[in-house]
Image (spheres, grey):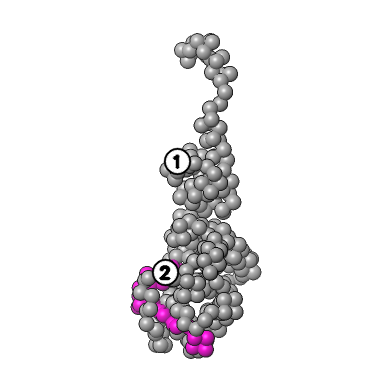
Amino acid sequence: MCRVLDVSVSGYYQWTQRSESNRSIETKKVKEAIKRIHKENREIYGSPRIAICLQEQGFQCSRPRTARLMKSMGIRSKVSKKFKVTTDSNHKKPIAHNLLDQVFKADFINDAWTSDLTYVWTGSGWLYLTVIMDLYNREIIDHSFSKRMTAETTVNPALDMALMHRRPDRGVVIHSDRGIQYASKSFRKKLEKHGLIQSMSGKGNCYDNAVTETFFKTLKTELVYSEHYRTREEARHSLFEYIEVFYNRKRKHSTLGYKGTSKKCLLIQIEK
């Protein structure tokens, strides 16, 4: 072997007895941490979020280095599939003015909420999911599941739960698309009763409700597209766990400086 490699016998033995460098030891630890973080976060984190996690754990590892190590290990985010936005706005019900005008920022908790609904296919048929999000920290305040796509089974229950949990003062802006459920008489009466101010997207402009639609894209690419739900109940359990356990409490959000919504809420309580 020494002749083939053109090295001396003494040099070879010195190499075999040489202690491992600190850099090599540190790299092994970083790789193990990357594997752990990737697995603990549903294999959806790419190099930016994993680099933040590494730094929080005390590793001096930049995003480019994290990306290089991930590539060498064959680790990547499993998120890739595209998401399609659909809205039923073909109706003649009243339409509210667009008060947000694509400014998806809020100055405090319960300043402005957004809402939207989507559907998930199961072996038992469609399951409809409605969510209400607080723009301040991107937390999903509450959500509802339904077998039918009516206001009474989708947006109304979600709003009732959000109001019960938050008990906001009057004047909260709640923004949505022009879907028939949000334009329904029963939903508008609830808003009026509790002093909420309705806002709606412009006609045919998907960017006007981009924040909530982005949440659905995240939900479906990080979870739904890799699952095959046999029943609605199975889907409900999976979606609930993702929203309440992972998204609201753990997932790092780029718009919050790669912090979780729970950390942002903690900062709010401290500031108060």
Is 175 displayed left or right of 9 in the figure? left
Amino acid of disc 2: Lys
Residue 117 in view: no
**Which residue is the site of mark 2?**
105
Q: Is residue 105 visible?
A: yes
The answer to which of 90 and 240 lies nearer the viewer is: 240
Per the model, the C-alpha gap separating discs 2 and 1 is: 33 Å
Residues rendered magenta in the picture: 191-213
Secondary structure type for disc 2: loop
State left or right for residue 146 relative to residue 84.
Answer: right
Q: How many marks?
A: 2
Where residue 65 is drawn, which disc sits there?
A: 1
Relative image position of residue 170 (x, y in whole percent): 50, 83
Spot occupied by residue 149 in the image (x, y as percentages of width and height): 53, 79
In this view, the residue in front, 159 or 92, is 159
* Observer-nearest of 78 and 22: 22
Badge 1 crowding class, 10 Å Cα cut-off, few under 14, some 14 to 19, many 20 or more, is few
Give residue 255's quadrant in the image. bottom left
Residue at 47% from the left image edge and 15% from the top image edge: 5
Element type at mark 1: helix
Of residue 121 and residue 140, the one placed in the foreground of this image is 140
